[in-house]
Image: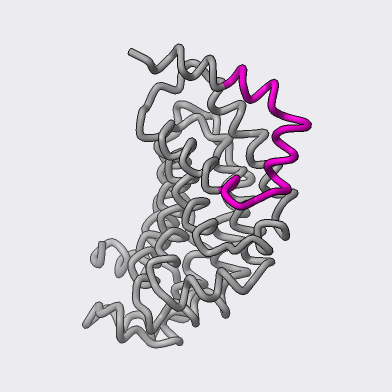
């Protein structure tokens, strides 16, 4: 990873890179400077395809550091997450079975966001910031539309991580986003070509977590969506009982 990134930084003549090149000498995630992080965010913005995967993969590791997560999430959410991750995924053809770059970028991006929840600081920020939570759920909705089962599984795991931070009131705040998410998940589960057990289990688990102590969502399911959901679960049972 390091050698590839050093070569990548050197190839971007337009990038101010003194701080990040100095950090590469030690390559210690816990001691990376804010200036170096700023330069890496700029690199993520201008990188393309496999280059972009490598930079987001680096942030996947850096953000595991309790000392780094707050600066990255609070200062660079708009460019790094909303533009480089969510925006890039939104304009990609997630149903292109011939592409390797698109699902790989989607998976790395989902894992990067999952790792925010592996620190206490990250969990606190995501619990208290409704707007970021909505962005995250909407990204999960986009990612669930992928035809790649590992992407769908990681989307479910990311949504699980977020829901674990939500109390009853917060679930009410994101009710509309959860409705949209579970309408799409019903289509995902209905797909008879989806047989990967880990993916199916992750989706069913996140559904259970969303409905737990969520009266509004339960009423929505009972009044509006129950008949269709029963058909989905019956189809799923027939598909997986053996």
What's the magenta region?
210-232
**Residue 21 placement (x, y as % from top left):** 32, 80
- Residue 71: horizontal and vertical position, in percent? 49, 82
At x 44%, y 67%, the residue is 116
Quarter containing the C terminus: top left
Which quadrant of the view contains residue 127?
A: bottom right
Which quadrant of the view contains residue 36?
bottom left
* Left or right placement of residue 134 versus residue 22 in this view: right
Q: How are the residues colored?
A: one colour
Query: Magenta stretch: residue 226 in it?
Result: yes
Asked if residue 169 lies in the magenta stretch, the reply is no
Task: State which quarter of the image contains the N terminus.
Answer: bottom left
- Residue shown at 57%/78% (left/top)? 74
Q: In the displayed structure, would residue 52 be above or below residue 183?
A: below
* Residue nearest the viewer, comparing 15 with 108: 108
Which quadrant would residue 33 be assigned to in this image?
bottom left
Give the answer, above or below, for where 137 lies relative to 190: below
Q: Is residue 38 left or right of residue 55?
A: right
Q: Who's the residue at 72% across and 60% down the image?
A: 173
Which SS does the magenta portion mostly show? helix
As rendered, which of 125 and 83 lies closer to the eye? 125
Q: Residue at x 61, y 61 (%)?
A: 83
How many numbered markers are drawn?
Answer: 0
* 47 in relation to 102, above or below: below
Q: Position of residue 77 (x, y in %)?
A: 58, 70
Q: Position of residue 206 (x, y in %)?
A: 50, 44
Determine the residue located farthest toward the right in the rendered image.
223
């Amino acid at each position: 990873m390091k050698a590839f990134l050093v070569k990548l930084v050197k190839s971007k003549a337009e990038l101010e890179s003194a701080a990040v090149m100095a950090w590469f000498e030690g390559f210690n995630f816990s001691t990376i400077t804010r200036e170096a992080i700023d330069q890496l965010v700029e690199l993520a913005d201008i990188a393309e395809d496999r280059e972009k995967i490598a930079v987001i993969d680096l942030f996947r590791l850096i953000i595991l550091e309790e000392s780094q997560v707050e600066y990255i999430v609070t200062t660079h959410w708009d460019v790094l997450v909303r533009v480089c991750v969510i925006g890039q995924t939104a304009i990609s053809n997630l149903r292109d079975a011939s592409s390797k770059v698109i699902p790989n970028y989607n998976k790395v991006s989902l894992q990067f966001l999952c790792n925010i929840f592996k620190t206490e600081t990250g969990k606190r920020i995501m619990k208290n910031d409704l707007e970021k939570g909505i962005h995250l759920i909407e990204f999960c909705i986009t990612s669930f539309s992928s035809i790649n089962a590992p992407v769908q599984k990681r989307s479910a795991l990311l949504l699980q991580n977020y829901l674990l931070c939500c109390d009853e009131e917060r679930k009410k705040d994101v009710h509309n986003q959860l409705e949209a998410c579970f309408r799409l998940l019903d289509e995902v589960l209905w797909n008879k070509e989806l047989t990967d057990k880990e993916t199916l289990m992750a989706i069913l688990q996140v559904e259970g977590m969303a409905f737990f102590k969520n009266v509004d969502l339960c009423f929505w399911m009972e009044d509006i969506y129950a008949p269709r959901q029963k058909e989905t679960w019956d189809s799923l049972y027939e598909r997986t009982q053996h």
